[in-house]
Amino acid sequence: MQASKPTNLQLDLTSDLTKWRAFLAIAELGSLTRAALFLDSNQSLLSRHLNALERECNARLFNRTGRGVALSDVGERIFPHVKALLADAEQLENEIRGEAREPIGRVTIGALPSITNPIVGRLFKQLRKRHPGIQLKILEGSSGQVEEWLADGRIDIAILYRYGKSPPEQEQALAIVDSYLIGAPGDRLTAGDDVPFAALHDLPFILPSVPNGLRTALDAAARAQRINLTPVIEADSLPLMRSTVAEANLFTVLPIHAVWSQVHEGRLQAARIVSPGLQRIVSMALARSKGPARAVSAVAAEIVAIVEEAARSGMWQLGTARPDPD
């Protein structure tokens, strides 16, 4: 039997896959700024990577435009090969790390503060028990910020509020949540289970500033009901809204899960808004590509399980339901 001979490959251009990952991100996003956000890097470093690649290739890989960058003819030709090379490299890394058996890696979630509160603690506990190789990174922001992070590839999973009968086609409806009038302990309006929308007329409110999905829905419903809905304070901080309602005898409108513990401890009161009700969908969207796929799928499955468990406690309805037409 003849002795094996070593494979004689001379591939200087593959010596640093980090630079080619930067190339791929810039090509797909069309911007060094967006690519830097996606890679959790900085623009100057990506620019150095790109310049180094162009020197090694002895060719321009991108054409600079007024709105960003676009692949040159050479860049267009090598793009599919680079993408395949990085996919193979990722598969090799996963095999080495054992990801084929157990999900590992960091998963980044972007959500509104009122949603993270009832989910993240339970999610961490479940992952630590079932998938200890997964690390979480949580980003909180407004709906607009979360959608921007998703578009930029800065997050793997987005959890958002959607209004209407169903979320966009590519998203998964997790739960249907009612809106509640939130008041201080002892308040008459929020002492019962329900309160008609007309009772919100001229109340002293602390509400989110526009643009905001809930504020838009509230303002539209107020116009339809011909009532006055003018906040005395505008604030986009959930903790501030809760504390101000309790301390200054103001009102706000929130889903019940945003004040779940405060209501059960008697620090706030909540009455469901009816006639008409204001419902929204808690929706989950996954980024097209970013973090480790098996880890992202595992986290998404745990989120669904946590939402189902919370539904059994009465926090919300499961997302298979449809919002009330009124």
Image (tube, rainbow, N blue to C red):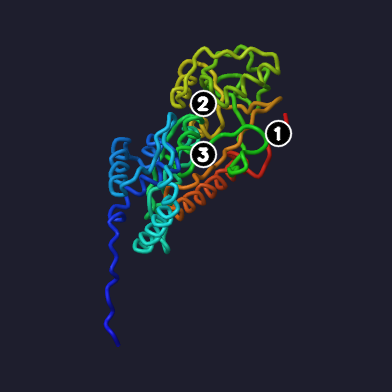
> As drawn, is 288 to the left or to the right of 13?
right
State the residue at coordinates (30%, 43%): 49
Point out the frontmost of discs 3 and 1.
Answer: 3
In the rendered image, which residue does mark 1 sit on? 324
Residue 268 circle label: 2
Does residue 77 lie above or below 258 as drawn?
below
Q: Badge 2: few (under 14), some or many (20 or more) residues near its Cα, within 10 Å?
A: many
CB within 8 Å, label 3 to label 1: no
State the residue at coordinates (42%, 32%): 65
Query: Gap in Å between the C-alphas at discs 2 and 1?
Result: 26 Å
Which of the 4 quarters of the picture holds residue 9?
bottom left
Regarding mark 3 in the picture, which secondary structure is present there? Answer: strand
Residue 130 circle label: none
The C terminus lies in which quarter of the figure?
top right
Q: Badge 1: few (under 14), some or many (20 or more) residues near its Cα, within 10 Å?
A: some
Q: Which numbered disc, 2 or 1, marks the residue that appears first in the sequence?
A: 2
Q: Amino acid at mark 3?
A: Ile
Q: Residue furthest bottom?
A: 1
**Residue 266 % position (x, y):** 50, 28
Point out the frontmost of discs 2 and 1.
Answer: 1
Q: Amino acid at mark 2?
A: Leu
Regarding mark 1 in the picture, which secondary structure is present there? Answer: loop
> As drawn, is 120 to the left or to the right of 281?
left
Q: Which numbered disc, 3 or 2, marks the residue that appears first in the sequence?
A: 3
Query: Gap in Å between the C-alphas at discs 3 and 1?
Result: 22 Å
In the rendered image, which residue does mark 3 sit on? 159
Front residue of 170/309: it is: 170
Query: Gap in Å between the C-alphas at discs 3 and 2?
Result: 26 Å
